[in-house]
């Protein structure tokens, strides 16, 4: 299944990722509201026993099925070496989960040379399974996804998030949040980047931006947006979203340049 890469291999990886996302999602769904071990990775960055249990489930399955592939996971970090890599967020939305708020997901991507080819985002509380295959479109529970067709920023609904160091780092996105709040129909903050991106792909949001993310936060969602006809860039419009410091802007493409102007401070 793991080498060489062929269309059948990619389909097999997609099926595998879907199966594992659903397994991890079932674990999280059963544990929702039951987290007992809530610890701090930072001042406001939480981790629960379910982050660890979900990641252990996913890592074990990948090791068994694709032992030659590397893994980049939120809690374990880099496991193995190679151009073929799984990027996994076992529980995106940990703060929501720890507070009993049912907005969280499992995010799994498979990439070669940091180019996502397979992406799955699973929302276990709504039983919404988003998936994408490079060149094969983006889908939600069997329905083909397309980004919205909104052309005007003032009529757009956006979504964003804030970095964990926002208390100490002046580049905390609060200024951009305020700028867009005054220029759009509204701005939401759900607390799970993978779901934000999935919802852009589904046309529920017209655009999304965030700074200082990790690849496991957005690799699957990035592919969903691209395969749904949207556009991905850095917040300044640059194309290398992996460059440090990381940033991401995702949109339907039609409001992308308008969002770049606001984020670059070029629109008063």
Image (spheres, rainbow, N blue to C red):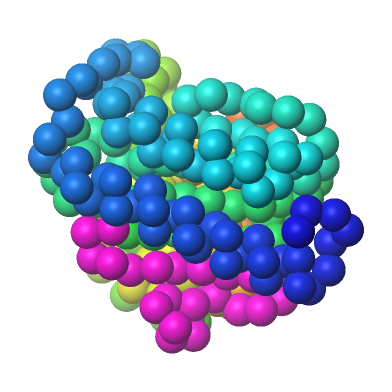
Q: Position of residue 93 (x, y in %)?
A: 31, 41
Q: Is residue 204 visible in the rendered structure shown here? A: yes
Residue 18 position, x and y percent, is 49, 63
Q: Quadrant of the N terminus?
A: bottom right
Residue 57 lies in the magenta-colored region: no
Left or right of 146 on screen, residue 27: left
Specify the segment rendered in magenta: 124-144
Who's the residue at 65% across and 48% down the image?
65
- In the rendered view, does 188 fall on the left or right side of 245? left
Left or right: 244 as drawn, with respect to 113: left
Name which residue lies at 27% across and 45% down: 28
Asked whether residue 206 appears in the rendered view, the answer is no
Residue 129 covered by magenta stretch: yes
Q: Nearer the viewer, residue 223 or 182?
A: 223
Pick the residue in front: 189 or 20: 20
Q: Please state the total of marks drawn on the protein image.
A: 0
Location of residue 122 with respect to 164 vertically, above or below: below
Using the rendered view, name the quadrant where residue 169 is placed: top left
Q: Residue furthest front?
A: 64
On the picture, is 61 further left or further right than 187?
right
Residue 108 place in picture, x, y as percent: 53, 51
Residue beneath the point at 29% across and 46% down? 27
Q: Position of residue 11 (x, y in %)?
A: 67, 71
Quarter of the figure with residue 200: bottom left
Residue in the image at 65% along x and 26% along y: 78
Image height of 264 relative to 137, above or below: above
């Amino acid at each position: 299944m793991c080498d060489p890469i062929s269309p059948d291999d990619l389909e097999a990886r997609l099926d595998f990722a879907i199966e594992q996302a659903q397994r991890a999602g079932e674990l999280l769904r059963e544990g929702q509201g039951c987290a007992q071990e809530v610890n701090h990775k930072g001042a406001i960055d939480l981790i629960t026993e379910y982050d660890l249990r979900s990641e252990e489930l996913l890592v074990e399955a990948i090791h068994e099925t694709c032992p030659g592939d590397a893994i980049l996971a939120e809690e374990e970090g880099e496991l193995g070496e190679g151009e073929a890599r799984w990027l996994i967020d076992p529980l995106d939305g940990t703060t929501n989960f720890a507070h009993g708020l049912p907005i969280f997901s499992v995010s799994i991507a498979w990439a070669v040379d940091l180019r996502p080819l397979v992406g799955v985002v699973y929302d276990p509380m709504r039983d919404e399974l988003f998936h994408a295959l490079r060149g094969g479109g983006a889908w939600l529970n069997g329905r083909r996804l397309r980004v919205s067709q909104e052309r005007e920023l003032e009529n757009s609904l956006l979504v964003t998030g804030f970095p964990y160091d926002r208390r100490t780092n002046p580049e905390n996105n609060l200024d951009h949040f305020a700028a867009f709040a005054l220029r759009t129909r509204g701005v939401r903050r759900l607390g799970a980047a993978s779901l934000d991106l999935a919802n852009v792909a589904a046309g529920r949001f017209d655009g999304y931006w965030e700074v200082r993310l990790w690849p496991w936060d957005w690799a699957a969602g990035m592919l969903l947006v691209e395969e749904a006809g949207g556009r991905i860039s850095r917040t300044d419009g640059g194309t290398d979203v992996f460059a440090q410091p990381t940033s991401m802007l995702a949109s339907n493409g039609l409001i992308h340049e308008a969002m770049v102007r606001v984020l670059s401070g070029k629109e008063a």
